[in-house]
Image (cartoon, rainbow, N blue to C red):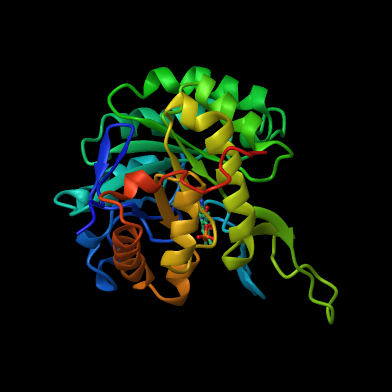
Amino acid sequence: MAEMTVNLAGVSLANPVVLAAGTCGYVREMADALPLGRLGAITTKSITAESREGNAPWRIIDSPAGMLNAIGLANVGIERFMQEKLPDARGLPCKLFGSVAGHSVDEYLAVASKFDRAPEIAAVELNVSCPNTSDGLQFGEHPEALRALLREVKPAVRTKPLFVKLSPNVGDIVAMAKAAIDGGAQALVVANTFSAMAIDVDTRAPRLSRGRGGLSGPGIHPIVVRMIHDVYHRVARDAKVPVIGLGGVSNWRDAAEFILAGASAVAMGTALFIDPRAPLRVVDGLSKWVDKQGCRSVAELVGAVKDGARAG
Ligand SMILES: Cc1cc2nc3c(=O)[nH]c(=O)nc-3n(C[C@H](O)[C@H](O)[C@H](O)COP(=O)(O)O)c2cc1C
């Protein structure tokens, strides 16, 4: 049997399959649908300093190759999360990553420093796909803004690794990956949703209440394969910073592509809405694939795409 454990900046996962932020609840909501002990890790939905109602409906709609969402970071806020949700993580049979969002450096700091002190959380993941209300710029779309955020947040995350989840809505994702690594990111999640819009042609109104949202699901998968490939070969491999691939994975073949492109672990989001047990088949399929490839460990296949040297 292939060795499926992976090491993400010192956090050991039983296998490379992770549930993505915002698609699996706070902590244990998916336990009714699948045995959480079969997963590598779960990511909390993004938590903000204050509670948020999120956007009005519609905030999730279908799309031919996935879905669009503009949830607006609906969550109970850090205080209630710590009191009411985090206790569910005691005895969790897989790792828990705590996702942090904010609209100012101080908001990120407030949540990240609480997560840093929570023993149930194995790593702190920054969702940087949020605008900074002070200048309107998205932290994850401007290298300088990301560097400035990390200068403040990195020192507050002392006891566990800091992961940065990159936005794909940039011209040069490698430049953003570099900024994240310079700022102290110990793993990169590639990537968040793609900025998108849908219009109802009868009413002529945008279908999402907020007008625009983020596209996820199978339609984005090949773009994310390319992004992982570029980030891994041009910066992450040499910096020894692992990549978690995320975007449109529905089955083990999609996950295997991410691994060959350079991902050490693979997260799943939209697929859970179609079949919450899909991650179990991905875990099993990956294990058989590693055996068939004649490898002892899944780690041997990270970045092993044959044309890997021709990055970018
Ligand atoms: C309904 C929904 C809610 C999401 N909420 C969050 C969130 O709170 N924080 C975050 O970092 N990403 C969030 N995401 C983005 C996912 O974690 C993931 O990056 C994206 O959906 C691409 O992966 P997928 O194609 O496997 O869904 C959300 C996605 C969806 C579909």
The reply to whether residue 81 is visible in this rendering is no
Would residue 279 appear left or right of 46 to someone viewing this image?
left
Q: Position of residue 213 (x, y in %)?
A: 67, 58
In the figure, 184 relative to 207: above or below? above
In the figure, 94 relative to 270: above or below? above
Query: Which residue is nearer to you in this view: 173 or 300?
Result: 300
Would residue 272 appear left or right of 203 to someone viewing this image?
left
Would residue 296 appear left or right of 276 to someone viewing this image?
left
Query: Which residue is nearer to you in this view: 256 or 15?
Result: 256
Q: Which residue is found at the position 30% from the left and 65% from the top?
A: 288
Q: Which residue is found at the position 67% from the left and 75% from the top?
A: 64
Q: Which residue is found at the position 33% from the left and 71% from the top?
A: 281
Q: Quadrant of the N terminus?
A: bottom left
Query: Which residue is nearer to you in this view: 36 or 137?
Result: 36
Q: Quadrant of the C terminus?
A: top right
In the figure, 230 relative to 255: above or below? above
Q: Residue furthest left?
A: 91
Q: Position of residue 72 (x, y in %)?
A: 58, 53
Give the number of marks: 0
The reply to whether residue 46 is visible in this rendering is yes
Q: Position of residue 117 (x, y in %)?
A: 26, 29
Query: Which residue is nearer to you in this view: 222 or 121?
Result: 222
Q: Position of residue 129 (x, y in %)?
A: 60, 42
Q: Which residue is found at the position 59% from the left and 20% from the top?
A: 148
In the figure, 307 relative to 66: above or below? above
